[in-house]
Image (cartoon, rainbow, N blue to C red):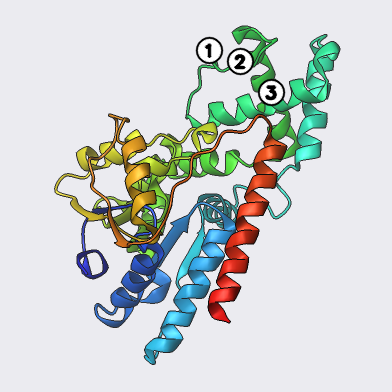
Amino acid sequence: KRAISHLWGPAMVIAGPGSGKTFTIVSRILFLIHHHYIPPEKILVITYTRAAAQEMKERFEKALAESEQTRSGGAVNFGTFHSICYHILKQSGAVHENSLIGENDKRKLLQVILGNMGFSSRCNYDALTALVNSISRLKNCAQEDAEGFAPDGFSDAEFATVRREYDRHLEEMEKIDFDDMIVKCLRLFHRPEVVQEYRKRFSCILVDEFQDINPPQYEILKRLAAPSGNLFVVGDDDQAIYGFRGAAPGIMRQFGRDFQGAEQIMLTENYRCGAQIVRMAERMISCNGERFAKKFAPVRAEGKVIFRCFDTRQEQERELIRTLSECGRAAMEDTA
């Protein structure tokens, strides 16, 4: 209730697994619209995958219909960081409709660059994949210095040259890659007149999966939410999975320092898993000292943890199929 009814200023919801965070976000959007009369088009909801954004939007529309209350104004803005930033770049004229370079064209461009540098022998699939990943990680960490980012087979100086040539070619072709959506939007937000326009457009910002945010994305949020700090973020530092994109769970702890007086709300009830599963997971994750201290509260009593060891992945998969089949048969018998 505290999370849903929070109105103004910064807030961070630390939501454990199965704690109903999507329900909380959807309910909060409805609360903002129906109880605080925030125009829907002024609400921006950001999550990390297109599937998650679509699911959030569908759940909101369903909840809105079930609430039997009318909605005036435009639509709530749902999207990923990348889709929202790309939309802002297009609106500003910084990019056009076909600016995004495809993955195959990206690899072909790197092949040309390596050939021009006399590195044709390093144009195999694995080397190109490593280069693509390293360039992506460098951009997502908001680093200009390429030192420490070079993939195997490249010195720091060689990698810095490849990255510099890659960006130069993209600029000449009037193309951007996936990660440039964030980087270029952040640069755009250094222009006061641009960021001020979007501050007026989005008065309420909600962010899901905040533990997976990276430095340039966080900087965009800080600039967009200033000066009111009306930023509502939901995440769980125990569930960070986007380290390969520069995600830094430590940003969740930084949030409290950057937004003084931010309300912190814990959602620790687990509605999804049985008690034994929750307790075992809690014992494992508690070994991590770099996390918010939290105590999970399982709602369901059932649940079982089984330890088994396998020599191969195939053996593991066969055992999973057997176990699931037994569970299915048992469920059917109970129903009968």
Of mark 2 and mark 3, the one earlier in the sequence is 3
Residue at 27 percent across and 55 percent down: it is: 268
Q: Amino acid at mark 3?
A: Leu
Cα distance between the residues tagged 2 and 3: 8 Å
Q: Which element is circle 2 on?
A: loop
**Quarter of the image where the C terminus is located:** bottom right
- Residue 147, which numbered label? 1
Between 179 and 236, the one lying in front of the other is 236
Classify residue 174 by image quadrant.
Answer: top right
Is any atom of residue 228 visible in this view? no
Q: Residues within 10 Å of mark 2 (few under 14, many from 20)?
A: many
In the image, taking residue 58 as reference, residue 4 lies left or right, namely left
- Residue 131, which numbered label? 3
Cα distance between the residues tagged 1 and 3: 14 Å
**Up/down of 110 relative to 259, above or below:** above
Q: Residues within 10 Å of mark 1 (few under 14, many from 20)?
A: few
**Up/down of 45 relative to 235, above or below:** below
Residue at 71 percent across and 40 percent down: it is: 175
Q: Amino acid at mark 1?
A: Glu
Residue 196 in the image: x percent, y percent?
36, 54
Between 304 and 161, the one lying in front of the other is 304
Q: Are marks 1 and 2 in contact (CB under 8 Å)?
A: yes
Q: Which element is circle 1 on?
A: loop
Q: Amino acid at mark 2?
A: Ala
Q: Residues within 10 Å of mark 3 (few under 14, many from 20)?
A: many
Residue 319 in the image: x percent, y percent?
65, 46
Q: Which element is circle 3 on?
A: helix
Of mark 1 and mark 3, the one earlier in the sequence is 3
Residue where numbered disc 2 is placed: 150
Residue 63 in the image: x percent, y percent?
42, 81
